[in-house]
Image (spheres, rainbow, N blue to C red):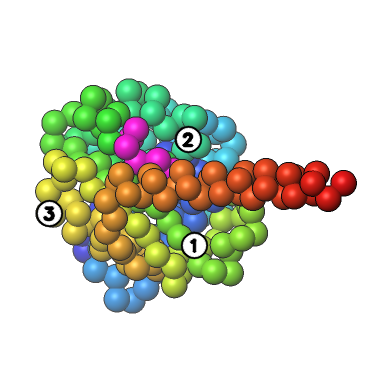
């Protein structure tokens, strides 16, 4: 059976749930490959706890080590840490590695990929749309990771222009193994959606404030 190595950078709810879902796949009788999962988190105790839980094969203490020589790297750090991670891991990604980036905005990540990734690595932006049972619970830490977090959900995929067909196919197949359906979206269009979604609650709050002020 083929072994696929994956390094997960950032073990919050998304990263930890991805590890659990891949472990679930490994245990199925129809599995065609086995995922060997290494995980890194800026808080080492989180990686150690997930390793003890059986979600990780290896808890790694250095971000460069978890990215080196992997077939797939899942980048699931907070937005404030994502771009700096490219500078740290870019040279350690092997040729043919597929880097999946969950950052909320894709254009900055695409620019960072162009600047920092070694030749032959392929960056694909992804945005999970979770299982509806978890969609609005507001929880985002590893303690609330769930093996079915992505089940019956969607995963928006935004490949870089340099990503080849095999890399895109690998990303799409991985999404299905996590339990989600893959949908391809233009990165710029995606970022416009995200900006509008973030601004909409603020606009509603402002409108409500002015409406109440006029009534006073």
Q: Quadrant of residue 177?
A: bottom left
The residue carrying pointer 1 sits among few (fewer than 14), some (14 to 19) or many (20 or more) residues within 10 Å by Cα, namely many
Q: Give x and y (percent) for residue 109.
A: 33, 35
Residue at the (65%, 59%) spot, across then down: 137
| Total residue callouts | 3
Disc 3 to disc 2, C-alpha distance: 27 Å
The residue most toward the front is 214
* Front in this rendered view, residue 118 or 212: 212
**Which residue corresponds to mark 3?**
165
Residue that appears at 58% across and 64% down: 134
| Span shown in magenta | 104-109
**Residue corresponding to mark 1:** 130
- For image coordinates 29% across by 70% down, the residue present is 31
What element does badge 1 sit on?
Answer: loop
Badge 2 marks a residue whose secondary structure is helix
Q: Is residue 134 above or below residue 29?
A: above
Residue closest to the eye, 108 or 101: 108
């Amino acid at each position: 059976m083929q072994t696929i190595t994956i390094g997960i950078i950032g073990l919050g709810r998304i990263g930890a749930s991805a590890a659990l879902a891949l472990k679930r796949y490994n245990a199925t009788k129809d599995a065609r490959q086995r995922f060997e999962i290494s995980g890194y988190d800026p808080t080492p105790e989180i990686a150690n706890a997930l390793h003890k839980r059986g979600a990780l094969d290896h808890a790694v203490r250095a971000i460069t080590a978890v990215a080196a020589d992997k077939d797939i790297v899942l980048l699931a750090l907070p937005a404030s840490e994502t771009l700096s991670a490219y500078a740290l891991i870019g040279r350690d990604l092997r040729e043919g590695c597929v880097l999946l980036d969950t950052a909320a905005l894709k254009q900055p990540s695409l620019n960072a990929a162009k600047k920092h990734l070694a030749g032959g690595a392929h960056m694909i932006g992804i945005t999970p749309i979770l299982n509806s049972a978890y969609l609005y619970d507001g929880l985002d830490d590893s303690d609330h990771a769930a093996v079915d977090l992505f089940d019956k959900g969607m995963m928006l995929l935004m490949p870089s222009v340099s990503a080849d067909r095999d890399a895109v196919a690998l990303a799409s197949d991985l999404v299905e193994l996590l339990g989600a359906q893959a949908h391809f979206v233009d990165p710029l269009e995606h970022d416009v959606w995200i900006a509008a979604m973030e601004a909409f609650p603020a606009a509603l709050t402002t409108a409500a404030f002015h409406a109440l002020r006029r009534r006073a």
